[in-house]
């Protein structure tokens, strides 16, 4: 299956070449927000929720991240319902209104096509509140998708990280792709690269980032408890049902 590995590695190279400068801009936005006491609000729907999970309460990840979502867009709670919800006008806007992001917060919205109302409205509403938006999306997939929102996620973003996911997501076999979706691989890499860029930028400025540590390593629980105390009030998802 070497050809699949080559295809994925090629797409990772494309992402580096296409979004390298934008990742630096996004890192600067995040660092400014963290230094000012802001929270990063992460949103997405359907399988893009995998990326919301990746940003939240993750070993090595940033502590001031709040998942911004509605349970109706989760496929595990009803696959067809999640598709309907992502296409429903006004739901994305209502979610942002409920979470109330405000400067110096930053929003990160994940959507491969960036064409459904839910992610587009999230970006619109955040921008209207003065909250910068980092869009993690694919220009190629967006061009090949149906326009259901009268615009795109990228069109309302402060910074766009183009994941270079091809239309339809699948990449195998090369001559007639029908399986092996790559959107999660590429979006995860984009987020990991952003965290690495942020780490380098913070180190250069002498800033210690608030990061989760694995609970399975010595001292991890103690470090995480301090972060929970620091951010629990603004991020209730960290301690609810405890």
Image (cartoon, grey):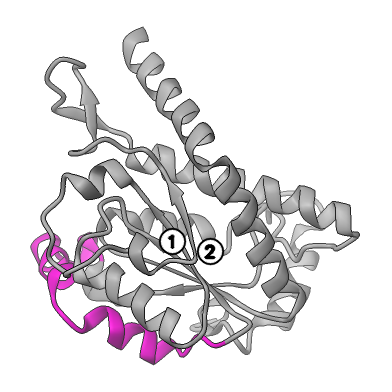
Residue 16 is situated, as x and y percent measured from the top left of the image, at 53, 34
The answer to the question of whether label 1 and label 2 lie on touching residues, with beta carbons closer than 8 A, is yes
* SS type, badge 2: loop
Tell me, yes or no, if residue 69 can be seen here.
no
| Pick the front one: 95 or 241 | 95
Would you say 33 lies left or right of 97 here?
A: right
Distance between the alpha carbons at the discs numbered 1 and 2: 6 Å
Categorize mark 1 by other alpha carbons within 10 Å: few (<14), some (14-19), many (20+): many
Q: Secondary structure at mark 1?
A: helix
| Residue nearest the observer in this picture, 191 or 215 | 191
Tell me the residue at 67%/74% (across/down).
33
Query: If the image is split into quadrants, where does the C terminus sit?
Result: bottom right
Q: Tell me, for residue 52, which label it has, or none.
A: 1
Camera sees residue 25: yes
> Can you say whether 45 is above or below 97 in the image?
above
Looking at the image, which residue is at 20% across and 84% down? 90
The location of residue 49, given as percent across then percent down, is: 35, 59
List the single residue furthest toward the right: 206
Residues in magenta, as a range: 74-102
Residue 34 occupies quadrant: bottom right
User: x and y percent of residue 89 in the render?
Assistant: 15, 79
Taking the magenta stretch, the answer to whether it contains residue 108 is no
Quarter in which the N terminus is drawn: top left
What residue lies at 11% left-to-right and 55% top-to-bottom? 146
- The image's mark for residue 234 is none
Q: Which residue is mark 2?
A: 56
- Quadrant of the image occupied by residue 4: top left
């Amino acid at each position: 299956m070497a050809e699949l590995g080559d295809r994925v590695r090629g797409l990772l190279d494309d992402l580096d070449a296409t979004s390298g400068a934008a990742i630096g801009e996004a890192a600067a936005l995040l660092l400014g927000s963290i230094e000012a006491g802001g929270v990063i609000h992460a949103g997405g729907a359907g399988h893009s929720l995998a990326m919301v999970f990746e940003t939240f309460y993750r070993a090595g990840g940033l502590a001031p991240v709040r998942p911004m979502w509605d349970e109706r867009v989760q496929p595990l709670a009803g696959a067809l319902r999640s598709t309907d919800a992502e296409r429903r006008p006004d739901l994305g806007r209502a979610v942002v209104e409920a979470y109330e992001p405000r400067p110096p917060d930053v929003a990160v919205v994940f959507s491969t096509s960036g064409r459904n109302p839910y992610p587009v409205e999230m970006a619109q509403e955040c921008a209207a509140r003065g909250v910068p938006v980092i869009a993690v999306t694919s220009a190629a997939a967006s061009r090949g998708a149906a326009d259901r929102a009268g615009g795109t996620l990228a069109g309302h973003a402060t910074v766009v990280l183009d994941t270079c996911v091809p239309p339809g997501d699948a990449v195998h076999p090369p001559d007639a792709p029908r399986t092996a979706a790559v959107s999660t691989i590429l979006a995860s890499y984009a987020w990991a690269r952003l965290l690495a860029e942020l780490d380098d930028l913070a180190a250069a400025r002498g800033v210690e980032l608030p990061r989760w540590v694995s609970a399975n390593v010595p001292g991890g629980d103690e470090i995480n408890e301090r972060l929970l105390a620091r951010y629990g009030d603004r991020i209730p998802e960290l301690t609810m049902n405890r």
